[in-house]
Amino acid sequence: MNTVSSLHTLTGNVQAKVEAEISRTRGVLRLAPCWVPRSFLQPGKRLKLHPDDLYAFGLNRGGIDERWFASTTPAANDNRTPDEGLSYCVVGNERFTLAQAVADTGATLIGSSIWNSYKKWPVYSKFFDNMGPIPHHMHQNDAQARLVGQEGKPESYYFPPQHNNVGNNFPYTFMGLEPGTTKAQVRKTLENWNKGDNGILDLSRAYRLKPGTGWLIPPCVLHAPGSLCTYEPQWGSDVFGMYQSLVEGREVPWNLLVKDMPAEKHHDLDWIVEQLDWEGNLDENFKDNHYLEPVPVADTRSEGFVDRWIVYGTVHGKQLFTSKELTIDPGTKVTIKDGGAYGLICVQGFGTINGLPLNSPKLIRFHELTEDEVFVTADGAAAGITFENKSETEPLVCLRYFGPDANPGAPKIGAYRQNSFA
């Protein structure tokens, strides 16, 4: 069995290696699984990671509750390993980070538009999998994050049915604040931090989570993700501020509220309250403006496949990321063209992608290499990637996410209501 530890890690410029590989595969780079632990959360056990490996980073680091896809973003964890959060490309018996590949090949890998604008792959996605809810928190916007040398983080959610055979302890997410909530009320919850439950959820409302649906969450909007396993296309940042002091009896330390705020503001309660997007949090039509259901790209069921938008819409008028779910019937072969580079994870079935093996494993060891994840170059996506379902009985299902402005024709929020390809 091939393992990550058996690979030779390349350093220095990898341009020639990348260009040779994408020429051979017509735009496909194999990626190794990227596991991330969180010290303050309890794993939900739906990542297909072997139960013996849930604490592979060590008990002190916490359980593994996330798998990151096509990531060039370091995880903002204390005591992290040097490459934590970074995806590795696998070519033969060698590996190198996707971040290095992008730095050395630029537009050849991610397309000229994204390269010229960002000089990096600015987005990533993950599976986020917990036994219970996590604290009510927000992610800073760009201006706020720049104060501590970071970038802001809008994000999105999709709840893949393949990873949600059980809902775990609390499949509901609190989002935003109840209309009419005042800044003084939120400030009072911060004053009460060390008294136990500071009561921030009393000021919010919960929404039941449903597999096969999703949400789009702008920065500075409070949310307390529930216990469904979540696919999360998002901006390439790991900033956050947690506004809830106690979750399921577990203490949330003050430093997780202020970790991405300037040191001189760590006890300025009025300033911390003002970090929230008050208009966004108090939106009386919050669900209508943030809820997502899949929208088919076209009526292709008679051709043996369906490609569906699962993340779409804009954040403050900008398309920062989008995502699609491709389902291919048994025995079907199809070529799919897209408007930009993407990261792909196979969540069900087996087959090929441009002739390379593609399959969703039943169980994964921590150091094991898989055949379920790839990065597709911009040119490869534009030319068309060929998928073939080799099963006689089971669909082949893949999720893929895209960077900024890759899909100008993507639907707007609420488009599922007008879906004519039900």
Image (spheres, rainbow, N blue to C red):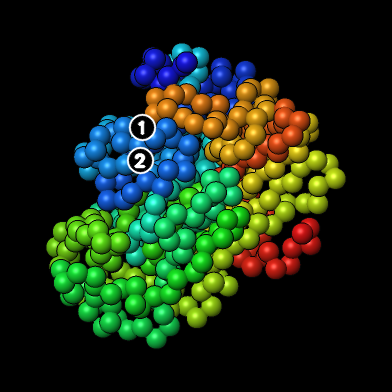
Q: Which residue is mark 1?
A: 53
Farthest residue to the right: give it. Answer: 302
Query: Is 17 situated left or right of 331 in this image?
Result: left
Answer whether labels 2 and 1 touch (C-beta < 8 Å). yes
Mark 1 lies on a secondary structure that is: helix
Farthest residue to the bottom: give it. Answer: 180
Name which quarter of the figure residue 387 lies in. top right
The percent coordinates of residue 365 (x first, y second) are 42, 27
Q: Is residue 8 above or below residue 111?
A: above
The percent coordinates of residue 292 (x first, y second) are 59, 62
Say which amino acid is labelled 1. Asp
Name which quarter of the figure residue 397 lies in. top right
Q: Residue at x 83, y 41 (%)?
A: 303
Check residue 262 in the rendering and tell me which mark sits there, or answer none: none
Q: Is residue 300 above or below residue 379?
A: below
Choose the circle earlier in sequence order: 2 or 1: 1
Position of the C terminus by quadrant: bottom right
Tag count: 2
Say which amino acid is labelled 2. Ile
In the image, 397 versus 418, the foreground residue is: 397
Label 2 – label 1 distance at C-alpha: 8 Å
Check residue 64 in the rendering and tell me which mark sits there, or answer none: 2
